[in-house]
Amino acid sequence: MKELFLLQVRLEIRKKSVVISLVLYLLSLVFINYVSLGPLNVSSLPGVWSAVFWLTLLSTVVNTIAKSFTAERSGASIYLYSLVDPAELIISKILYGFLLCGGICAAGFLFFATLLSNPIQDMPLFALTLVLASFGFSASLSLLAAIAAKTNNGSVIMAVLSFPVVIGILLMAIKVTKNCIDGLERSASVDELVTLGAINLLVSAVSYLLFPYIWRS
Amino acid sequence: MAKLKNPRGLEDSQVMKMSYWKILSILLLVYTVTGGFLMEVPRLAIVNETIRSLYFHVPMWFGMVVMFLTSTLYAVRYLKKPGAYFDIISVEFANTGLIFGFLGIVTGMIWANYTWGTPWHGDPKQNGAAVALLIYCAYFVLRGSLENSEQRARLSAVYNIFAFAAMIPLIFIIPRLTSSMHPGSGGNPGFNTYDLDRNMRMVFYPAVIGWILLGVWIATVRIRLRNIEDKILELEYEKNH
């Protein structure tokens, strides 16, 4: 499993264009936000900042995870994956996706802070939310990416399948982020964080159980 | 549901039997409609006579959850033991669930228009319901975009189970955390905390059972139809080859 995980990291680094295209995608999205929201003085509207931030991340993350299986439809990797246990494969995919999503979240926040503003008052809590949400995105989207990769119009199907599923994670994340901006006490966000953690556990357990059925073909 | 166990028996599946539970469903729904419109209800401000929507709006959600749950259970059975029959059952229960969910949203919007002032209020339960419908619409989109029937059945079964699991927090947990304009919120959103009086319970419980039975009935009719269609296709194929 460790080898699988490392292999994916190595493959990704070798294809530098992919990483660069992702960063550019994110940067352009943030720039569009900046151009369209710039006149509004977003830092005075905590709800708007939080919503726009998470929507930007969502579309980037969906696009990122969507290609985690499509890239492997052809080539030697099929042979490789016929050798390994599907359960191990999905775990390594989720972990790798977690790494990528975490990177995207961090980069997204950096872009937002420089271009728009940084209204976050409770940084540690916000960082925890980012980590939990990245794991949730990765766990729920990896399985859907595997499903979408089997269809002939994968990218549209990926979006259709994933949006209703990640709404729960998104709602909780937006709420905690707004609490962080308002500088509320941490006890105000406990319910949301616990729910987020529970969603993560549920989604990764179900992915782990269901993935072998997709992989059989 | 003993009848569903006979996969290919056309003789059995062609004949629509009038089982006791179908008669029960008809009787309960006749009682719901007459009793629901004629029996005494509490006089409450704002809600007034619209409180009678309770017998039609709320059972739609119970029906929807039961239909989707059945659909998911048959998806699990399909994955355990693949066979076209379980797939058909799973799809048709999801279809019926969608109809119930859609009716639930429409009846809710009509009711909300009179009591809350606008049809759509961004209430957490409204949003949860909308997400449930989106998920099962996506389920049908996924089925539409896969051509191989075996692959379609397997992948959509996986999505069905996964989406149902992801839906649980959204419609059972998050509405309990946030405030809502629905009655009984800020605690258990189930019907136990509704301040139903005794008269209303006498119509409400039968209404729930009646609507659910009707849903199962619709689903079984559609399953039978699909089986007959498959059988016809099979016979035609045999004739031509």
Image: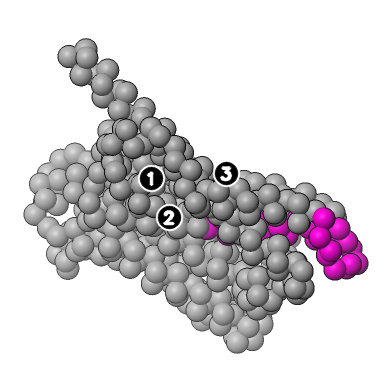
Residue type at the position of mark 2: Thr
Parent chain of label 1: B
Considering the image in quadrants, where does the C terminus of chain B appear?
A: top left
Is A25 left, or right, of A179 in this rendering?
A: left
CB within 8 Å, label 2 to label 1? yes
The residue carrying mark 2 is B70
Among the 4 quarters of the image, the one containing residue B150: top left
Majority secondary structure of magenta residues:
helix
> Which kind of residue does numbered mark 1 sit on?
Ile
The disc, 1 or 3, on the residue closer to the chain's N-terminal end is 1
Marks 2 and 1, how far apart at CA: 9 Å
The image shows residue A201 at horizontal and vertical percentages of 38, 72
Q: Residue furthest top?
A: B240
Q: Which residues are magenta?
A: B38-65
Is B31 or B212 nearer to us in this picture? B31
Relative to residue A196, is residue B152 drawn left or right?
A: left
Q: What amino acid does circle 3 point to? A: Ile
Circle 1 residue: B89
Which is more N-terminal, label 1 or label 2?
2
Q: Residues within 10 Å of mark 1 (few under 14, many from 20)?
A: many
Q: CA distance from mark 1 to mark 3?
A: 16 Å
Image coords of residue A171 (percent x, y): 58, 64
Q: Is residue B93 visible?
A: yes
Report how far apart the C-alphas of labels 3 and 2 lie in the structure.
Answer: 15 Å
Q: Residues within 10 Å of mark 3 (few under 14, many from 20)?
A: some
Q: Residue at x 36, y 36 (%)?
A: B13
Query: Which mark is first along the chain, 2 or 3?
Result: 2
For image coordinates 55% across by 48% down, the residue present is: B23
Q: Which residue is mark 3?
A: B99
Of the pair B199 and B110, the residue shown nearer to us:
B199
Secondary structure under tag 1 reads helix
Within 10 Å of disc 2 (Cα), the crowding (few <14, some 14-19, many 20+) is some
